[in-house]
Amino acid sequence: MTTEVNVAVRSDAGAAKTRKPLRVALLGFGTVGQAVARILTERDDLRDRLQLTHVFNRGIARKRVDWLSASVVWTEDFDEILESRPDVVVEVVGGVDIPYGWVRQALSQGVSVVTANKLLMAAHAPELLALAATRDARVRFEAAVAGGVPIIDAIRSGLSGDRLTRVVGILNGTCNFILSRMTDGDSMAGALGEAQRLGFAEADPTSDVDGHDAAAKLSLLAGVAFRRYLRTADIPTRSISSIDAVDFRYAKRLGGTIRQLAMAEADGSGGVEASVGPALVDETSSFARNRGAQNLVMVSGRYGGATTFSGEGAGGHPTAVAVVSDLVAISRPGSWQDPGDLVWEPGTVIAARARPYYLRFMVRDRPGIVASITSALSQSDINIDAVLQEPGFPRDRLPFVVTVEPCLATALHAAMQEVESQGFHAEPPVVMPVVPREEHAAQKQ
């Protein structure tokens, strides 16, 4: 089934010829789904372009609301949605396997799809984009990355004249909230508890704090920016759970603070350096100034330099705004999709380039500890930049920091394996890359 494009057009004489608005079926009526329906209901100026016709949700009896038009059909049957011949299906259910089947069915029948589902797109984007191309349908997923920050459209349209080389950002609002609170002296447990109380963090925050959520979003950004598909499982991740309040004391001494960064850099031949984890960032950078649950993304190109985008990265209304913006884009006269957006070649995650690192040790004090660490680093040809030790800690849990000059992650890993085999550790060491000041210098708001 090929979908007729229903938009308002004008003749050469300027007389309006209005076709029916796009018929929109909404899958999911949770926080985001309700916010999408609210916008479509309350914005009178969109009614000639977008018409909400169906709401799909399990257990619709408990989901019905009286503020939706009586003409909206409530259903628990996805086949009923397709039989109604919608123009666009909005998927805000979440999960992967079941929504994947629905989205494939819709696209196969020429129905466009708007989704906020980062996990679905990170797992199946190349296939779904290619299928859409064969059916003259659209797949838009602005809401899947950075919530209300229009980063995908900015890359596809606003930066399409550049050759993009690097994407780095704060893509998880939960982690940014936690690390912002820890900057102000809170503990990891206290900051996480507050994030959960405010609804920024799930009861099980593992996906956020261990970097898997940000890795899925980074996979999508790499696809849009470089047109290279990175499997989420191939992106190295490091948890923020090992970060302690003492790390912020040392970070401050080094002129910085700590943020969870998702970084991807193309090498020009299909390889992409990619990672997610805590990093030491300069205190004057946009990353350091980005606080609370906000997201921030810096995109760098060969010709245009670096551009930074920031805004609310989570929540029902910011995400719903991104969803409705995608619907509006599809409804525009002459709506089209760059064929290049539909082809993501397989990308290879390559080893990180040489960069400086922050190493924090928590030890049971005894003679020769620093000598052991220095020896292991030296054997891997890694030069020490500085050794820092804050006073006032018990000798059975004594923290100190070693910063090292730029080195390859593989060499550092080998050295740290040797260091960690020693018996003086009170807890495992913390390893973080340092983002040098010059990597922030080209930013522009």
Image (tube, rainbow, N blue to C red):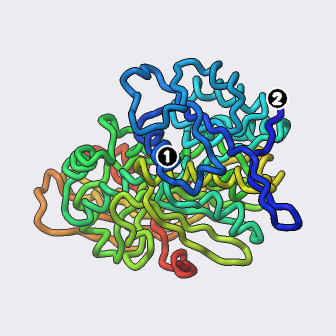
The residue at the point 63 percent across, 28 percent down is 100
The picture places residue 270, in percent across and down from the top left corner, at 77, 53
Which quadrant holds residue 2? top right
Secondary structure found at label 2: loop
The picture places residue 297, in percent across and down from the top left corner, at 53, 64
Res 425 seen here: no
Amino acid type at circle 1 is Thr
> What residue would you read off at disc 1?
41
The picture places residue 382, in percent across and down from the top left corner, at 50, 64
Which image quarter holds the N terminus? top right
- In this rendered view, identify the residue nearer to me: 215 or 434: 215
Left or right: 167, with 316 as reference point: right
Left or right: 365, with 221 as reference point: left
Residues at marks 1 and 2 touching, judged by CB atoms closer than 8 Å: no
Q: Distance between the residues labelled 1 and 2?
A: 28 Å
The picture places residue 239, in percent across and down from the top left corner, at 40, 47
The residue at the point 68 percent across, 26 percent down is 84
Does residue 14 sit above or below 200 in this rendering?
below
Mark 1 burial class by Cα count in 10 Å: few <14, some 14-19, many 20+: some
Amino acid type at circle 2 is Met
Mark 2 burial class by Cα count in 10 Å: few <14, some 14-19, many 20+: few
> What residue would you read off at disc 2?
1
**Upstream in sequence: badge 1 or badge 2:** 2
Does residue 342 sit above or below 59 in this rendering?
below
The residue at the point 63 percent across, 46 percent down is 50
